[in-house]
Protein backbone atom coordinates (compact mmCIF):
# COMPACT_ATOMS: atom_id res chain seq x y z
CA UNK A 1 0.00 0.00 0.00
CA UNK A 2 3.01 2.30 0.60
CA UNK A 3 3.84 5.23 -1.60
CA UNK A 4 1.26 4.06 -4.14
CA UNK A 5 -0.80 6.38 -6.30
CA UNK A 6 1.25 9.39 -5.27
CA UNK A 7 -0.25 11.50 -8.05
CA UNK A 8 -3.43 13.28 -7.13
CA UNK A 9 -5.94 15.54 -8.85
CA UNK A 10 -5.18 17.91 -5.98
CA UNK A 11 -1.54 18.45 -7.03
CA UNK A 12 -1.09 22.23 -7.27
CA UNK A 13 -4.53 22.81 -5.67
CA UNK A 14 -3.25 25.72 -3.58
CA UNK A 15 -2.13 27.59 -6.70
CA UNK A 16 -5.59 27.47 -8.31
CA UNK A 17 -7.98 30.41 -8.12
CA UNK A 18 -10.59 29.93 -5.40
CA UNK A 19 -13.44 29.41 -7.91
CA UNK A 20 -11.55 26.46 -9.46
CA UNK A 21 -10.75 25.03 -6.01
CA UNK A 22 -14.45 25.09 -5.16
CA UNK A 23 -15.30 23.40 -8.48
CA UNK A 24 -12.73 20.66 -7.91
CA UNK A 25 -13.97 19.96 -4.37
CA UNK A 26 -17.55 19.92 -5.70
CA UNK A 27 -16.66 17.44 -8.45
CA UNK A 28 -14.59 15.18 -6.19
CA UNK A 29 -17.17 15.08 -3.38
CA UNK A 30 -20.34 15.19 -5.51
CA UNK A 31 -21.62 18.44 -3.99
CA UNK A 32 -24.81 19.91 -5.50
CA UNK A 33 -25.47 23.60 -6.22
CA UNK A 34 -27.03 24.31 -2.85
CA UNK A 35 -24.17 22.58 -0.99
CA UNK A 36 -21.66 24.64 -2.97
CA UNK A 37 -23.61 27.81 -2.11
CA UNK A 38 -23.48 26.85 1.56
CA UNK A 39 -19.74 26.22 1.34
CA UNK A 40 -18.91 29.49 -0.37
CA UNK A 41 -21.25 31.61 1.71
CA UNK A 42 -23.54 32.43 -1.25
CA UNK A 43 -26.21 30.97 0.98
CA UNK A 44 -25.36 32.63 4.31
CA UNK A 45 -25.82 30.92 7.64
CA UNK A 46 -29.29 31.85 8.87
CA UNK A 47 -29.58 33.78 12.11
CA UNK A 48 -32.92 32.05 12.56
CA UNK A 49 -31.11 28.70 12.70
CA UNK A 50 -28.48 30.20 15.02
CA UNK A 51 -31.30 31.29 17.32
CA UNK A 52 -32.14 27.61 17.84
CA UNK A 53 -28.57 26.56 18.56
CA UNK A 54 -27.56 28.93 21.35
CA UNK A 55 -29.05 31.71 23.50
CA UNK A 56 -28.89 35.51 23.24
CA UNK A 57 -27.86 35.35 19.57
CA UNK A 58 -26.70 38.67 18.17
CA UNK A 59 -24.75 37.51 15.14
CA UNK A 60 -22.53 34.86 13.60
CA UNK A 61 -18.74 34.45 13.67
CA UNK A 62 -17.41 33.51 10.25
CA UNK A 63 -14.27 31.39 10.15
CA UNK A 64 -12.30 30.36 7.05
CA UNK A 65 -12.98 26.80 5.89
CA UNK A 66 -10.20 25.17 3.87
CA UNK A 67 -9.44 21.64 2.74
CA UNK A 68 -6.24 19.74 3.43
CA UNK A 69 -5.27 17.64 0.42
CA UNK A 70 -3.17 14.55 -0.38
CA UNK A 71 -4.47 12.41 2.48
CA UNK A 72 -4.54 8.71 1.70
CA UNK A 73 -5.88 7.09 4.87
CA UNK A 74 -6.25 3.30 4.93
CA UNK A 75 -5.91 3.39 1.15
CA UNK A 76 -8.77 5.90 0.64
CA UNK A 77 -8.19 9.42 -0.70
CA UNK A 78 -9.82 11.79 1.78
CA UNK A 79 -10.23 15.56 1.54
CA UNK A 80 -10.06 17.09 4.99
CA UNK A 81 -12.33 20.08 5.71
CA UNK A 82 -10.75 22.34 8.33
CA UNK A 83 -12.34 25.41 9.93
CA UNK A 84 -9.45 27.31 11.44
CA UNK A 85 -8.09 30.82 11.83
CA UNK A 86 -4.37 29.97 12.20
CA UNK A 87 -2.11 30.54 9.20
CA UNK A 88 -0.11 27.63 7.79
CA UNK A 89 -1.95 24.74 9.49
CA UNK A 90 -3.61 23.58 6.27
CA UNK A 91 -0.50 24.18 4.15
CA UNK A 92 1.70 22.17 6.56
CA UNK A 93 -0.87 19.40 6.87
CA UNK A 94 -1.28 19.03 3.10
CA UNK A 95 2.47 19.14 2.43
CA UNK A 96 3.12 16.50 5.09
CA UNK A 97 0.32 14.26 3.79
CA UNK A 98 1.88 14.54 0.31
CA UNK A 99 5.29 13.57 1.66
CA UNK A 100 3.84 10.50 3.41
CA UNK A 101 1.86 9.60 0.30
CA UNK A 102 5.00 9.41 -1.81
CA UNK A 103 7.10 7.46 0.67
CA UNK A 104 4.92 5.79 3.27
CA UNK A 105 1.39 5.26 4.48
CA UNK A 106 -1.26 6.25 7.03
CA UNK A 107 -3.38 3.62 8.74
CA UNK A 108 -5.95 3.84 11.52
CA UNK A 109 -8.26 1.80 13.71
CA UNK A 110 -10.70 2.14 16.61
CA UNK A 111 -10.17 0.68 20.09
CA UNK A 112 -13.50 0.33 21.88
CA UNK A 113 -16.82 1.94 21.06
CA UNK A 114 -18.35 2.70 24.46
CA UNK A 115 -18.95 6.09 26.05
CA UNK A 116 -19.19 6.54 29.81
CA UNK A 117 -22.07 7.92 31.87
CA UNK A 118 -21.30 8.57 35.54
CA UNK A 119 -23.80 8.32 38.40
CA UNK A 120 -22.18 9.42 41.64
CA UNK A 121 -23.15 8.40 45.18
CA UNK A 122 -21.09 11.06 46.95
CA UNK A 123 -21.05 9.95 50.56
CA UNK A 124 -21.98 6.35 51.15
CA UNK A 125 -22.71 5.07 54.66
CA UNK A 126 -22.04 1.44 53.87
CA UNK A 127 -20.10 1.01 50.62
CA UNK A 128 -19.92 -2.81 50.79
CA UNK A 129 -23.70 -3.11 51.15
CA UNK A 130 -24.38 -0.55 48.38
CA UNK A 131 -21.92 -2.29 46.04
CA UNK A 132 -23.55 -5.66 46.68
CA UNK A 133 -27.07 -4.33 45.99
CA UNK A 134 -25.95 -2.57 42.83
CA UNK A 135 -24.10 -5.68 41.68
CA UNK A 136 -27.16 -7.90 42.26
CA UNK A 137 -29.33 -5.45 40.30
CA UNK A 138 -26.83 -4.86 37.54
CA UNK A 139 -28.90 -6.60 34.81
CA UNK A 140 -32.09 -4.79 35.81
CA UNK A 141 -30.32 -1.38 35.83
CA UNK A 142 -28.88 -1.99 32.35
CA UNK A 143 -32.37 -2.96 31.11
CA UNK A 144 -33.87 0.13 32.70
CA UNK A 145 -31.16 2.29 31.15
CA UNK A 146 -31.85 0.85 27.71
CA UNK A 147 -35.58 1.45 28.14
CA UNK A 148 -34.72 5.18 28.37
CA UNK A 149 -33.13 5.17 24.90
CA UNK A 150 -35.36 2.95 22.73
CA UNK A 151 -34.34 4.74 19.50
CA UNK A 152 -30.67 4.04 20.18
CA UNK A 153 -31.39 0.39 21.03
CA UNK A 154 -33.38 0.05 17.78
CA UNK A 155 -30.32 1.35 15.88
CA UNK A 156 -28.19 -1.38 17.48
CA UNK A 157 -26.67 0.68 20.30
CA UNK A 158 -27.37 0.97 24.01
CA UNK A 159 -25.89 0.28 27.42
CA UNK A 160 -23.62 -2.77 27.42
CA UNK A 161 -22.11 -2.79 30.88
CA UNK A 162 -22.14 -1.28 34.33
CA UNK A 163 -18.96 -0.81 36.36
CA UNK A 164 -18.95 0.15 40.04
CA UNK A 165 -16.00 2.11 41.37
CA UNK A 166 -15.20 3.00 45.00
CA UNK A 167 -13.24 6.20 45.59
CA UNK A 168 -11.90 7.75 48.77
CA UNK A 169 -13.53 11.08 49.51
CA UNK A 170 -10.81 13.73 49.40
CA UNK A 171 -11.97 15.23 52.70
CA UNK A 172 -11.77 14.15 56.32
CA UNK A 173 -15.24 12.51 56.53
CA UNK A 174 -13.74 9.01 56.30
CA UNK A 175 -16.64 8.00 54.02
CA UNK A 176 -16.42 6.48 50.58
CA UNK A 177 -17.77 7.71 47.27
CA UNK A 178 -19.29 5.22 44.82
CA UNK A 179 -19.31 5.98 41.12
CA UNK A 180 -21.30 3.92 38.63
CA UNK A 181 -20.13 3.86 35.02
CA UNK A 182 -22.83 3.06 32.47
CA UNK A 183 -20.94 1.98 29.35
CA UNK A 184 -22.96 2.72 26.25
CA UNK A 185 -22.56 2.22 22.52
CA UNK A 186 -23.89 5.49 21.03
CA UNK A 187 -23.66 4.22 17.40
CA UNK A 188 -22.98 7.26 15.20
CA UNK A 189 -23.90 9.89 17.80
CA UNK A 190 -21.42 11.60 20.09
CA UNK A 191 -23.89 10.51 22.73
CA UNK A 192 -23.72 13.28 25.35
CA UNK A 193 -27.47 13.93 25.42
CA UNK A 194 -28.36 10.24 25.36
CA UNK A 195 -26.09 9.29 28.20
CA UNK A 196 -26.97 12.30 30.36
CA UNK A 197 -30.66 11.51 29.98
CA UNK A 198 -30.33 7.89 30.95
CA UNK A 199 -28.08 8.61 33.93
CA UNK A 200 -30.57 11.15 35.29
CA UNK A 201 -33.48 8.81 34.64
CA UNK A 202 -31.83 6.08 36.73
CA UNK A 203 -31.22 8.29 39.75
CA UNK A 204 -34.51 7.60 41.64
CA UNK A 205 -34.24 3.83 41.13
CA UNK A 206 -30.62 3.76 42.36
CA UNK A 207 -31.53 5.84 45.42
CA UNK A 208 -34.46 3.55 46.14
CA UNK A 209 -32.35 0.39 45.80
CA UNK A 210 -29.41 1.54 47.89
CA UNK A 211 -31.07 4.00 50.31
CA UNK A 212 -28.11 6.25 49.47
CA UNK A 213 -28.25 9.70 47.93
CA UNK A 214 -27.23 10.14 44.29
CA UNK A 215 -25.15 13.23 43.44
CA UNK A 216 -24.03 14.08 39.91
CA UNK A 217 -25.33 12.30 36.81
CA UNK A 218 -23.25 13.22 33.76
CA UNK A 219 -21.11 11.76 30.98
CA UNK A 220 -17.33 11.58 31.38
CA UNK A 221 -15.19 13.23 28.71
CA UNK A 222 -12.31 10.91 29.62
CA UNK A 223 -13.58 8.35 27.13
CA UNK A 224 -10.75 5.84 27.44
CA UNK A 225 -13.25 3.20 26.36
CA UNK A 226 -13.55 4.76 22.87
CA UNK A 227 -10.11 5.43 21.46
CA UNK A 228 -8.96 6.26 17.95
CA UNK A 229 -5.52 5.10 16.86
CA UNK A 230 -3.51 6.21 13.83
CA UNK A 231 -0.11 5.14 12.58
CA UNK A 232 2.23 6.65 10.01
CA UNK A 233 5.30 5.15 8.37
CA UNK A 234 7.76 7.22 6.33
CA UNK A 235 10.18 4.93 4.52
CA UNK A 236 13.84 5.72 3.85
CA UNK A 237 13.69 9.05 5.60
CA UNK A 238 16.75 11.30 5.64
CA UNK A 239 18.35 9.98 8.86
CA UNK A 240 19.11 13.48 10.18
CA UNK A 241 15.46 14.48 9.81
CA UNK A 242 14.24 11.17 11.24
CA UNK A 243 16.56 11.37 14.26
CA UNK A 244 15.51 14.97 14.82
CA UNK A 245 11.82 13.97 14.89
CA UNK A 246 12.55 11.05 17.24
CA UNK A 247 14.54 13.41 19.47
CA UNK A 248 11.55 15.80 19.56
CA UNK A 249 9.42 12.94 20.99
CA UNK A 250 12.01 12.36 23.72
CA UNK A 251 11.93 16.04 24.62
CA UNK A 252 8.11 15.91 24.91
CA UNK A 253 8.28 12.73 27.01
CA UNK A 254 10.79 14.30 29.39
CA UNK A 255 9.16 17.70 29.75
CA UNK A 256 5.46 18.57 30.22
CA UNK A 257 6.21 22.12 29.03
CA UNK A 258 7.20 20.68 25.67
CA UNK A 259 4.53 17.93 25.71
CA UNK A 260 1.83 20.59 25.97
CA UNK A 261 3.05 22.35 22.81
CA UNK A 262 3.60 19.01 21.06
CA UNK A 263 -0.03 18.12 21.82
CA UNK A 264 -1.20 21.57 20.74
CA UNK A 265 0.34 20.74 17.36
CA UNK A 266 -1.64 17.47 17.29
CA UNK A 267 -4.85 19.33 18.13
CA UNK A 268 -4.08 21.87 15.39
CA UNK A 269 -5.03 19.02 13.07
CA UNK A 270 -8.00 17.70 15.01
CA UNK A 271 -9.92 20.75 16.28
CA UNK A 272 -10.47 22.28 12.82
CA UNK A 273 -12.18 19.07 11.63
CA UNK A 274 -14.31 18.95 14.77
CA UNK A 275 -15.35 22.57 14.27
CA UNK A 276 -16.05 22.05 10.55
CA UNK A 277 -18.22 19.02 11.26
CA UNK A 278 -20.11 20.61 14.19
CA UNK A 279 -18.55 18.34 16.81
CA UNK A 280 -17.83 19.28 20.42
CA UNK A 281 -14.11 20.10 20.30
CA UNK A 282 -14.02 21.10 23.98
CA UNK A 283 -15.01 17.55 24.88
CA UNK A 284 -12.29 16.05 22.70
CA UNK A 285 -9.68 18.53 24.01
CA UNK A 286 -10.57 17.76 27.64
CA UNK A 287 -10.40 14.01 26.98
CA UNK A 288 -7.13 14.29 25.06
CA UNK A 289 -5.34 16.20 27.82
CA UNK A 290 -6.66 13.93 30.57
CA UNK A 291 -5.60 10.87 28.55
CA UNK A 292 -2.16 12.43 28.06
CA UNK A 293 -1.87 12.53 31.87
CA UNK A 294 -3.00 8.97 32.53
CA UNK A 295 0.42 7.82 33.78
CA UNK A 296 0.42 10.62 36.36
CA UNK A 297 2.77 12.71 34.21
CA UNK A 298 1.55 14.77 31.24
CA UNK A 299 2.88 13.04 28.11
CA UNK A 300 2.85 13.55 24.34
CA UNK A 301 -0.19 11.98 22.67
CA UNK A 302 1.96 10.82 19.77
CA UNK A 303 5.29 9.08 19.56
CA UNK A 304 7.87 8.96 16.73
CA UNK A 305 10.63 6.38 16.55
CA UNK A 306 13.23 5.40 13.96
CA UNK A 307 13.11 1.77 12.93
CA UNK A 308 16.06 1.09 10.61
CA UNK A 309 15.69 3.65 7.82
CA UNK A 310 12.00 4.22 8.50
CA UNK A 311 10.22 6.66 10.77
CA UNK A 312 7.21 5.26 12.63
CA UNK A 313 4.56 7.40 14.32
CA UNK A 314 1.61 6.41 16.48
CA UNK A 315 -1.16 8.28 18.24
CA UNK A 316 -3.93 7.02 20.50
CA UNK A 317 -6.54 9.28 22.07
CA UNK A 318 -10.18 9.32 23.22
CA UNK A 319 -12.42 10.42 20.39
CA UNK A 320 -16.14 10.77 21.11
CA UNK A 321 -17.45 12.31 17.90
CA UNK A 322 -20.68 11.99 15.98
CA UNK A 323 -21.94 12.04 12.42
CA UNK A 324 -25.59 12.23 13.49
CA UNK A 325 -27.37 14.23 16.15
CA UNK A 326 -26.36 17.49 17.80
CA UNK A 327 -25.12 20.26 15.55
CA UNK A 328 -23.67 17.87 12.95
CA UNK A 329 -26.99 17.64 11.15
CA UNK A 330 -28.43 21.08 11.98
CA UNK A 331 -25.56 23.27 10.82
CA UNK A 332 -25.64 23.40 7.01
CA UNK A 333 -21.86 23.84 6.64
CA UNK A 334 -21.22 20.93 9.02
CA UNK A 335 -23.37 18.74 6.77
CA UNK A 336 -21.35 19.78 3.72
CA UNK A 337 -18.08 19.22 5.62
CA UNK A 338 -19.18 15.67 6.47
CA UNK A 339 -19.99 15.08 2.81
CA UNK A 340 -16.54 16.40 1.81
CA UNK A 341 -14.94 13.94 4.23
CA UNK A 342 -17.05 11.15 2.80
CA UNK A 343 -17.23 9.33 6.13
CA UNK A 344 -20.24 7.15 6.67
CA UNK A 345 -19.81 6.42 10.38
CA UNK A 346 -18.64 8.21 13.51
CA UNK A 347 -15.89 5.61 13.99
CA UNK A 348 -14.41 6.54 10.62
CA UNK A 349 -14.58 10.25 11.50
CA UNK A 350 -12.73 9.47 14.76
CA UNK A 351 -10.00 7.63 12.85
CA UNK A 352 -9.61 10.45 10.32
CA UNK A 353 -9.26 12.96 13.19
CA UNK A 354 -6.54 10.87 14.82
CA UNK A 355 -4.71 10.45 11.49
CA UNK A 356 -4.82 14.17 10.67
CA UNK A 357 -3.66 15.03 14.21
CA UNK A 358 -0.67 12.71 13.77
CA UNK A 359 0.20 14.09 10.33
CA UNK A 360 -0.11 17.69 11.55
CA UNK A 361 2.20 16.83 14.43
CA UNK A 362 4.73 15.29 12.02
CA UNK A 363 4.68 18.44 9.88
CA UNK A 364 5.43 20.62 12.92
CA UNK A 365 8.19 18.33 14.23
CA UNK A 366 9.81 18.06 10.80
CA UNK A 367 9.95 21.86 10.54
CA UNK A 368 11.17 22.25 14.14
CA UNK A 369 13.87 19.61 13.66
CA UNK A 370 15.13 21.19 10.42
CA UNK A 371 14.54 24.79 9.31
CA UNK A 372 12.45 25.90 12.30
CA UNK A 373 8.82 26.95 12.34
CA UNK A 374 9.23 30.66 11.67
CA UNK A 375 10.18 30.49 8.00
CA UNK A 376 7.06 28.76 6.65
CA UNK A 377 4.75 30.30 9.19
CA UNK A 378 5.85 33.89 8.66
CA UNK A 379 5.71 33.68 4.88
CA UNK A 380 2.05 32.73 5.13
CA UNK A 381 1.44 35.06 8.07
CA UNK A 382 2.45 37.99 5.84
CA UNK A 383 -1.10 38.18 4.45
CA UNK A 384 -2.50 38.60 7.98
CA UNK A 385 0.00 41.37 8.63
CA UNK A 386 -0.96 43.09 5.37
CA UNK A 387 -4.65 43.01 6.32
CA UNK A 388 -3.93 44.14 9.87
CA UNK A 389 -1.86 47.03 8.45
CA UNK A 390 -4.97 48.19 6.61
CA UNK A 391 -4.27 46.92 3.07
CA UNK A 392 -7.28 46.84 0.75
CA UNK A 393 -8.02 43.54 -1.03
CA UNK A 394 -6.19 44.71 -4.19
CA UNK A 395 -3.11 45.72 -2.16
CA UNK A 396 -2.69 42.53 -0.09
CA UNK A 397 -0.71 40.55 -2.68
CA UNK A 398 1.82 43.36 -3.20
CA UNK A 399 2.33 43.99 0.52
CA UNK A 400 2.70 40.26 1.02
CA UNK A 401 5.33 40.02 -1.72
CA UNK A 402 7.30 42.89 -0.23
CA UNK A 403 7.07 41.35 3.24
CA UNK A 404 8.42 38.06 1.87
CA UNK A 405 11.42 39.91 0.48
CA UNK A 406 11.97 41.74 3.76
CA UNK A 407 11.75 38.43 5.61
CA UNK A 408 14.49 36.99 3.41
CA UNK A 409 16.83 39.89 4.12
CA UNK A 410 15.95 40.82 7.71
CA UNK A 411 14.70 37.40 9.00
CA UNK A 412 11.85 39.21 10.71
CA UNK A 413 8.57 40.89 9.79
CA UNK A 414 6.00 42.58 11.97
CA UNK A 415 2.99 44.88 11.84
CA UNK A 416 4.91 48.14 11.83
CA UNK A 417 7.03 46.87 8.92
CA UNK A 418 3.82 45.97 7.06
CA UNK A 419 2.45 49.48 7.71
CA UNK A 420 5.63 51.08 6.39
CA UNK A 421 5.48 48.96 3.24
CA UNK A 422 1.83 49.82 2.69
CA UNK A 423 2.50 53.51 3.15
CA UNK A 424 5.38 53.37 0.69
CA UNK A 425 3.24 51.49 -1.84
CA UNK A 426 0.62 54.20 -1.56
CA UNK A 427 3.25 56.81 -2.32
CA UNK A 428 3.97 57.87 1.27
CA UNK A 429 7.40 58.01 2.90
CA UNK A 430 9.24 54.74 3.54
CA UNK A 431 10.57 55.29 7.05
CA UNK A 432 13.46 52.86 6.81
CA UNK A 433 15.84 51.98 4.02
CA UNK A 434 13.69 49.12 2.78
CA UNK A 435 15.31 47.14 0.00
CA UNK A 436 11.97 45.66 -0.92
CA UNK A 437 9.96 48.83 -1.55
C1 LIG B 1 1.89 25.98 16.48
O1 LIG B 1 0.52 26.26 16.30
C2 LIG B 1 2.10 24.51 16.79
C3 LIG B 1 3.53 24.10 17.12
O2 LIG B 1 4.02 24.90 18.19
C4 LIG B 1 3.52 22.64 17.50
C5 LIG B 1 4.82 22.10 18.03
O3 LIG B 1 5.63 22.89 18.58
O4 LIG B 1 5.01 20.88 17.92
C6 LIG B 1 4.45 24.35 15.97
Image: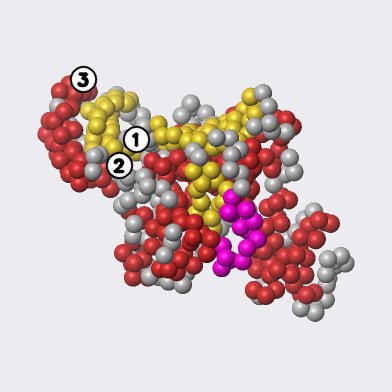
**How far apart are the alpha carbons under marks 3 and 2?**
34 Å
Labelled pair 1, 2 in contact (Cβ < 8 Å): no
Is residue 13 within the magenta segment? yes
Disc 3 + disc 2, Cβ < 8 Å: no
| Real-space CA distance between mark 1 and mark 2, rounded to the nearest whole angstrom | 8 Å
Mark 1: few, some, or many residues within 10 Å (few <14, many ≥20)? many
User: Is residue 19 magenta-colored?
Assistant: yes
Q: Residue 234: give x, y in percent of width and height.
A: 63, 34
* Badge number at residue 99: none
Q: Secondary structure at mark 3?
A: helix
State the residue in front, 312 or 24. Answer: 24
Q: In the drawing, does residue 186 fall left or right of residue 111?
A: left
Which quadrant is the N terminus positioned in? top right
Q: Give the residues drawn in magenta, as a range.
A: 8-22
Query: In the rendered image, which residue does mark 1 sit on?
Result: 113
Q: Residue at x 26, y 26 (%)?
A: 164
**177 sits to left or right of 9:** left
Up the image or down, 299 lies above or below 147; here it is: above
Instruction: Give the CA separation, mark 3 to mark 1.
Output: 30 Å
> x%, y% of residue 270?
50, 46
Mark 2, Cα crowd under 10 Å, few <14 / some 14-19 / many 20+, is many
Q: Which residue is mark 2?
A: 187
* Comparing labels 3 and 2, the label whose residue is closer to the camera: 2
The numbered disc on residue 128 is: 3
Which of the marked residues, 3 or 1, is nearer the chain's N terminus?
1
Q: Nearer the viewer, mark 3 or mark 1?
A: 1
Would residue 280 be visible to someone looking at this image?
no
Relative to 366, 147 lies left or right: left
| Numbered disc 2: secondary structure | loop
Q: Nearer the viewer, residue 294 or 128?
A: 294
Amino acid sequence: MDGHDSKSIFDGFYRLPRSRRVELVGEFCGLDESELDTLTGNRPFSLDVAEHLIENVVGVFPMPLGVATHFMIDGREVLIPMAVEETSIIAACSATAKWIRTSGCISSYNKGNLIIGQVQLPSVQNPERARMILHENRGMLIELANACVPGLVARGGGVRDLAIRTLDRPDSSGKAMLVLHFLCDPCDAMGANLINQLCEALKPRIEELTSEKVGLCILSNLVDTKLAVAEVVVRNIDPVVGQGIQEATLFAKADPYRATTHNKGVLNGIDPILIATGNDWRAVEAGAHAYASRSGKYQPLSEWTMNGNDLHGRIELPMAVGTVGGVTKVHPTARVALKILGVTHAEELARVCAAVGLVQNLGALKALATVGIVKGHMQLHAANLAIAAGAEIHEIARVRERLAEVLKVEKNINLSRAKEILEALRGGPAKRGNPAV
